[in-house]
Amino acid sequence: MDSPKIYYIKYGKKTISYRIVYSGRKTLGITVTPEKQVIIRSPFNAPVKKINDILQKRLNWISDKLSYFESLPQTAVERRYIGGETHYYIGKQYRLKIIKSPWETVKLKGAYINVYTLHKDNNKIVKLLLDNWYIEKAIIRIDYILDSLLPKFKKYNISKPNIIIKNMKKRWGSCSAKGNIILNSDLIKAPLSCIKYVIVHELCHLVHRNHDKNFFKLLTSILPDWKKTKLYLDAKI
């Protein structure tokens, strides 16, 4: 059975915590998870010096991975919908503030997303109000972004597609056979560059249905840096 142990090591100004999980494996491996956990999987008989030597050699890589995951919007974190919790909108981090009020509404103010409700201690109602606010914002913002991107497809003579925003577990977007573009409701929490990438990706499917070389040629001509953005999003789905 795995026996986790927690250790700490300094790297520059950082203090990195990591777990050692011993098992019957033959080789030693290091994993950095999206939850910013560093896990060293080691054979039972691995000398401590060998573990430390390998860890020291990989500290730069570990630090880079941790910094990368820290930069991502934490859409996958389980939310409790209580005051002080962190939420994201257009890639920026905000604190949730729940205010008792006879009117039920949500407003963005400074560094806070304020949820006004008579039922401030009911996290299910807070979640419902916040989810509805995200969808309302997504409808307006995505329509504006879509209008700004359509001129790039002018020579292909495509019509403005119908946008459908819904909860999607495994995808950020898709394009239906009827030409409708379906977008993940969580996309509005991601940085603007990510929102643009997903919309452009699906618009390209209105020109080239499959992921063939012509599709990627068109995508690259509009968003040369799309691969970096895709990697960013792939880590969060």
Image (cartoon, helix red, strand yellow):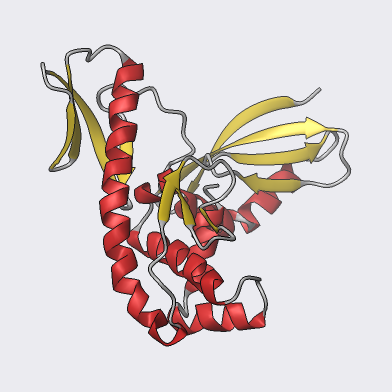
Q: Is residue 68 left or right of residue 139?
A: right
* Above or below for 217 versus 162: below
Outermost bottom residue = 155
Q: Is residue 22 left or right of residue 174?
A: right
Q: Is residue 180 left or right of residue 112?
A: right
User: How many marks are shown on the rendered structure?
Assistant: 0
- Out of 18 and 82, give the one closest to the viewer: 82
Q: Position of residue 68 (x, y in %)?
A: 47, 55
Q: Quadrant of the N terminus?
A: top right
Q: Position of residue 127 (x, y in %)?
A: 34, 25
Residue at the image point whose x is 44% and y is 76% from the top: 158
- Out of 132 and 35, give the one closest to the viewer: 132
* Above or below for 155 versus 106: below
Residue at the image point whose x is 82% and y is 40% from the top: 46
The quadrant where residue 82 appears: top left
The quadrant where residue 7 appears: top right
Would you say residue 179 is visible in this rendering? yes
Q: Position of residue 203 (x, y in %)?
A: 47, 70
Q: Position of residue 232 (x, y in %)?
A: 50, 58
Would you say residue 86 is visible in this rendering? no
